[in-house]
Amino acid sequence: MNDGGGSGRIEAARMRQLLRTYLVIGSTNCCIEPLRVLEEALAGGVTLVQFREKGPGALTGAPLRELAVQLQGACRQRGVPFLVNDDVELALAIGADGVHVGQEDEAAVRVRARIGDRILGVSAHTLAEAEAAVRHGADYLGIGPIYPTASKADAKAPQGPGILRELRACGIALPLVGIGGITIESAGEIIRAGADGIAVISAITQAADVREAATRFVAGSIAESS
Ligand SMILES: Cc1ncc(COP(=O)(O)OP(=O)(O)O)c(N)n1
Ligand SMILES: Cc1ncsc1CCOP(=O)(O)O
Ligand SMILES: [Mg+2]
């Protein structure tokens, strides 16, 4: 399953649906067992999952692969696509539904050649980066950080929702997801600014009640789209 719904690249309309409540998760983001956090978030209705194992204490080697396979299995049980951040080798090895790469990672045009029709997400911070990613075969763009974040040590300066309005005004039509410091309270503004969804790490993974937090994001997303 890459949830393109069969052979060929995923349709933009389907990609927009998947981006509505996009969980990004790694062991360093979780206060309890990552599988338990993911299962609670899936029960709350998250629509897409990215495995992002980065930062101090991040797993490597066999333990990293084992966690990836474990989390992917939980997503498969719920029919939610599972993407891998940065590591194209790992994504291909475990049969993930796609990858997300940034401007400092393997070039999007080469990743597209390696992954075939699987989902390809690319980070963009400027119109030029967004236009290049579109040319190079991205299925969606990750835009941010929108707000300050403690989950990415090397994050660029927060841009605010205005970057989303700018990209849309300049003709970027690809599915967009906002990321960076997004909370339940700020999610609506991200959608109104032009994003198709929101990507979240800490507001879900570090919530006192993960399922409830995910549920509130999903409910907010539905309300914004109605
Ligand atoms: C959905 C989404 N958007 C942006 C990012 C950031 O990717 P990148 O710039 O490559 O930084 P790292 O996440 O690799 O530190 C993302 N991972 N997901
Ligand atoms: C991976 C990434 N890319 C830009 S900001 C960020 C971290 C988002 O984490 P949080 O939702 O906890 O701010
Ligand atoms: Mg990256």
Image (cartoon, rainbow, N blue to C red):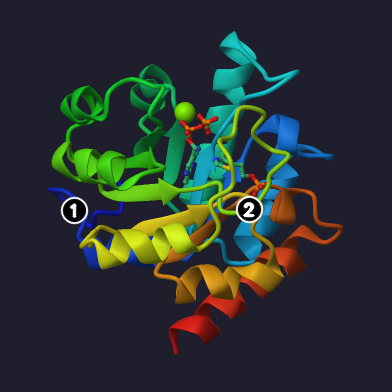
Identify residue type, mark 2: Tyr
User: Percent x, y for residue 54?
Assistant: 62, 25
- Check disc 2 and report its element: helix, strand or loop: loop
Q: Residue at x 39, y 69 (%)?
A: 194
Using the image, determine if residue 30 lies above or below residue 108: below
Residue shown at 47%/72% (left/top)?
191
Q: With 136 as the anchor, is 167 left or right in this view? A: right
Q: Residue 75 at what x, y percent from top left?
A: 51, 48
Residue named by callout 1: 6
Along the line of sight, the residue nearer the viewer: 72 or 90: 90
Q: Mark number for residue 94?
A: none
Q: Report the quarter where the C terminus lies.
A: bottom left
Is 171 in front, or is 105? 171
Q: Which residue is mark 2?
A: 147
Q: Please name the residue shown 69% across and 69% down the image.
A: 184
Give the foreground label among 2 and 1. Answer: 2
Say whether residue 21 is visible: no
Q: Name the element at disc 1.
A: loop
